[in-house]
Image: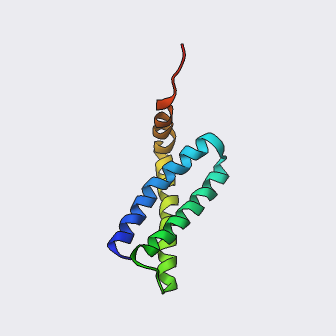
Amino acid sequence: MTEIQASLTVATVLVVPYIVQAIKTKAMTGGVARWTAIAVSAGCGALTAMAGGVPTDPSAWVTSIFACVGGVQVAYAAFKSVGITDKWLDALLALGDIKED
């Protein structure tokens, strides 16, 4: 894994949980959100694998894809356990709402 691929993996791991939580808040159940996160992170892993050119070795594909999928799942579990995805993201999503008194 190159430095660019490692950087893209870390970015994916930190961003995808927030995207999925934002979508989940409006339209999805937890199970659907989990599978959406897995699908999106697998796609990002495939794109990460291609960052250094299309890999000819299957292990490069597997390494990048599973690094993203596993990283996103670990990050989401960690974020959820400390309330980042629920409290912080809900507060950010509520910034655009104007409450009438």
Toward the bottom, the furthest residue is: 57
Q: Residue 84: horizontal and vertical position, in percent?
A: 46, 43
Q: In this view, does 29 lie to the left or right of 51?
A: right
Toward the left, the furthest residue is: 3
Q: Quadrant of the C terminus?
A: top right
Vertical relation: 14 (above or below) 47: above
Vertical relation: 52 (above or below) 94: below
- The structure residue drawn at horizontal position 48% and vertical position 40%, both measured from the top left corner, is 89
- The structure residue drawn at horizontal position 52% and vertical position 40%, both measured from the top left corner, is 86
- The structure residue drawn at horizontal position 58% and vertical position 46%, both measured from the top left corner, is 23
Q: In this view, does 48 lie to the left or right of 36?
A: left
Colouring used for the render: rainbow
Counting every numbered tag in the picture gives 0
Q: Would you identify the image quadrant in which residue 50 lies? A: bottom left
Vertical relation: 19 (above or below) 44: above
Q: Nearer the viewer, residue 66 or 11?
A: 11
Q: Nearer the viewer, residue 82 or 3?
A: 3
Q: Residue 33: horizontal and vertical position, in percent?
A: 62, 52
- The structure residue drawn at horizontal position 51% and vertical position 71%, both measured from the top left corner, is 46
Q: Residue 49: horizontal and vertical position, in percent?
A: 46, 74
Toward the top, the furthest residue is: 101
Q: Would you identify the image quadrant in which residue 38 lies? A: bottom right
Q: Residue 60: horizontal and vertical position, in percent?
A: 47, 80
Q: In which quarter of the image is the N terminus?
A: bottom left
Vertical relation: 97 (above or below) 55: above
